Amino acid sequence: MSGTDLPRITVVTPSFNQARYLERTICSVLEQGYADLEYMVLDAGSTDGSREIIERYAERIDYWRSAPDGGQSAAINEGWRRSRGQVLSWLNSDDYYLPGALQFVGEFFRDHPDEWVVYGSWEAVDDEGRRLNYAGSRFSRRTM
């Protein structure tokens, strides 16, 4: 745990040709204001301007690269292998966090040290952020 008594959270964003959404994703992570964040963006060699978007935020991203890889799972695994976080997460490049998401997760793990997984509800939105659908329920082995 860090000096804030909250765990370090590592967020990995795998991406390929998602320039249309990537900046919103990156900003949603960086603007969380979480005290002990490690953030990585692993781009698979996009040709749509994604690299330029990542470079704009490079000073605030702990690790990034833009090169062909073995796909989404390979990118997530690469990021998690590099991570120093006690809590591991991935956020796809066409998704974004709502404000306070990482603070909630960090406090949950601080207050429930025996838990090993947490997940939240989600909202599906269109390109303008209009809500299309919502899903979320308490954990159940049967529904998982």
Image (cartoon, rainbow, N blue to C red):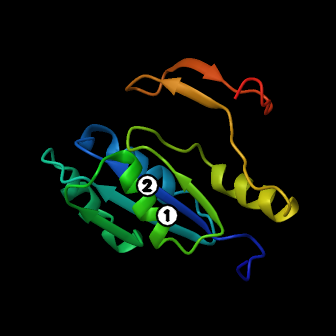
Residue 65 pos. (x, y %) = 27, 65
Q: Residues within 10 Å of mark 1 (few under 14, many from 20)?
A: some
Q: Residue at x 67, y 32 (%)?
A: 121
Q: Residue at x 76, y 27 (%)?
A: 137
C-alpha span from label 1 to label 2: 6 Å
Would residue 21 be seen by someone viewing this image from the given angle? Answer: yes
Q: Which residue is mark 2?
A: 76
The image quadrant of residue 86 is bottom right
Would residue 23 be seen by someone viewing this image from the given angle? Answer: no
Q: Which residue is mark 1?
A: 80
From this viewpoint, which residue is outermost toward the left? Answer: 47
Quadrant for the C terminus in the image = top right
Q: Nearer the viewer, residue 124 or 10?
A: 10
| Secondary structure found at label 2 | helix
Of the residues shown, which amino acid type is indicated by label 2? Ile
Residue 85 pos. (x, y %) = 60, 70
Residue 44 pos. (x, y %) = 24, 52
Quadrant for the N terminus in the image = bottom right
